[in-house]
Amino acid sequence: MNSIITVKGLTKTYKKVDAVKGINFDVKEGEIFGFLGPNGAGKSTTINMICTMLKPTSGEIIINNYDAKKQKDEVRASIGIIFQENTLDGKLTANENLKLHCRFYNVPKNKREKRIQEVLEIVDLVDEQNQRVEEYSGGMKRRLEIARGLLHYPKVLFLDEPTVGLDPNTRAHLWEYILKLKEKEGITMFLTTHYLDEAEISDRVAIMDQGEIIAIDSPASLKDQLGGDIIELSTEDNEAALREIEDKMETVEVKVEDDTIHLKVESSDAFISSFIKTLEIPITKLNIRKPTLNDVFLAFTGRKIKE
Amino acid sequence: MEGILAIWQRDLTKFFRDRARLFGSFSMPILFLLIFGGGLSGTMETMMSGGFGEESSGFNYVEFVFPGIVAMTLLMTAIFSAMSVIEDKNYGYMKEILVSPISRVSIAVGKMLGAATVSTIQGVILFLLIPFLGLSYSIISLIQVIPFMFLLGAALSGVGLLFASMIKSTQGFQLIVQIIVMPMIFLSGALFPVSNMPGWLDVIVKLNPVTYGVDVMKKIMIDVDSLPQTVQETMGLHITVFGRTVSVFEEILFILAFAVIFVAIATISFKRAHA
């Protein structure tokens, strides 16, 4: 597959702080690329540089074969951005907001109305298009912004925390729309999110921490790299249980957090039956699961994402 | 071009939807017309006839103040319209504009034309008061003055765009505008002649674009040549810079240059802005 975005040796230095320290990565055409990292990792700085909103200190960014430093207008025409915060004009109707966007992006006059109806249909807002946006709910606004981002047929759609501040139900719906979009239009998506379970839909994820990219792969192989399964349990006496586990059993890793013991084992199927037989201290809670992106994140950065 | 039109049209649409703003902005000019027109005209006219006797009969002070009040309305509306830039920044819409491929100069020109159109409309609505004030300007002169009002509105909105690019909050903007706008009105000859000012104030008068704007408007709207020389001089209708009387053509040129310089400054500020 061709790369739609290529980033080479990208750095951004503010007065004394290196916000981005020479990162390299590429995004393939048609994939969903998840871009994760704790606050202050340099994610926003990186995205702003890719979107031509911030001048890099050094390095190279190529999007859709255009240079983000020299061919700003071409790059701007090739991308759509859904910002974290609302950037709609509340005093105008949804249709008017979309019409303005068409004009900003030079969509030919005779195609505007057709495209507007087309994107409104994708996000189910056809019937509400003549209402003022200030009357919209949070979820409707988000959907309208996604529709607007698609109007000029961008090659890459940037979604910066698209579900922040939405209730779980709306969030789930929004992802349905986004996936539908990927299937129908084959647009490349560059996604940042705080909700790591949402990043699972990515084809590949990059984890950024302290200005560097520390891991980049598919969610599945990142989880495989962690190895094995995770067992979480509470017992009547965690300290005694811990001693017993460390003495008698073959685990990859043992950790205690709050009042839960976290075990990492190569295969939970083989481990669990003998484990339960062996452990003398009564178990009060037991949970066996496959690793999630949260575990990956924790393993790579030593932190949870929302610290 | 399409980008300029889009930005211009958006500001116009929003202006017509905001009725409170439409009517609220008339309170100030009407107040000034009452104070300066009703209150001061008697005094001015008595002084005139006392000083020049018969020669100044038929002198109507309100006729002189009215173009000044229209210019004042242009100034206030043009500058306050530029405040939409700050609102767009605060409500996030500026991001949508800045990440699009519109050239930065189109953004500045679109905003300037929007403010110029809105202020011209406000100014023209004031013409409705003419019959009630007992004034009579020729229809032709009123039609002639409209394009100039548009130019003046564009130039003055440039001042607003400059402040809008430097100030983050609308409250801060309103405060600065109050500090700047009032002197610009009082030191322009809009309300009273400014031909005999002390040296340092005279410098401000001559640098103030409103001075030339008001002067051109008076010269288009009032039949100046038929007035006695003494009245022309007392009302400050001959502005001199470095001892030379400036022509209407030069005044228009100055205002045009003013507009171009400020649109250039605004373009630079949009280039620097990253959402």
Image (cartoon, grey):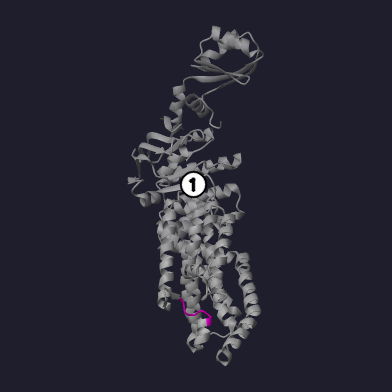
**Residue located 61% across and 18% down the image:** A233
The residue that disc 1 covers is A82
**Residue located 36% across and 51% down the image:** A74
Residue A297 higher or lower than B198, as above or below: above
Q: Chain ID for label 1?
A: A
Give the prevailing secondary structure in the magenta stretch: loop
**Residue A249: where, in percent of width, then height?**
53, 9
**Residue B212: where, in percent of width, then height?**
47, 73
Front position in the image: B250 or B235: B235
Numbered disc 1: secondary structure: strand
Residue B96 higher or lower than A60, as above or below: below
Front position in the image: B216 or A87: B216
**Residue A98: where, in percent of width, then height?**
49, 56
**Residue located 47% across and 87% down the image:** B225
Please identify the quadrant where the N terminus of chain B is shown: bottom left
Question: Disc count in the image?
Answer: 1
Residue B172 higher or lower than A209, as above or below: below
- Asked whether residue B130 is drawn in magenta, I would say no
Classify 10 Å Cα crowding around label 1: few (below 14), some (14-19), many (20 and above). many
Q: Is residue B167 left or right of residue A239?
A: left
Give the residue type that dot 1 points to. Ile
Q: Is residue B134 in sight in this rendering? A: no
**Residue B104: where, in percent of width, then height?**
41, 56
Q: Is residue B203 in sight in this rendering? A: yes
Q: Which region shows up in magenta?
A: B234-239
Front position in the image: B157 or B68: B68
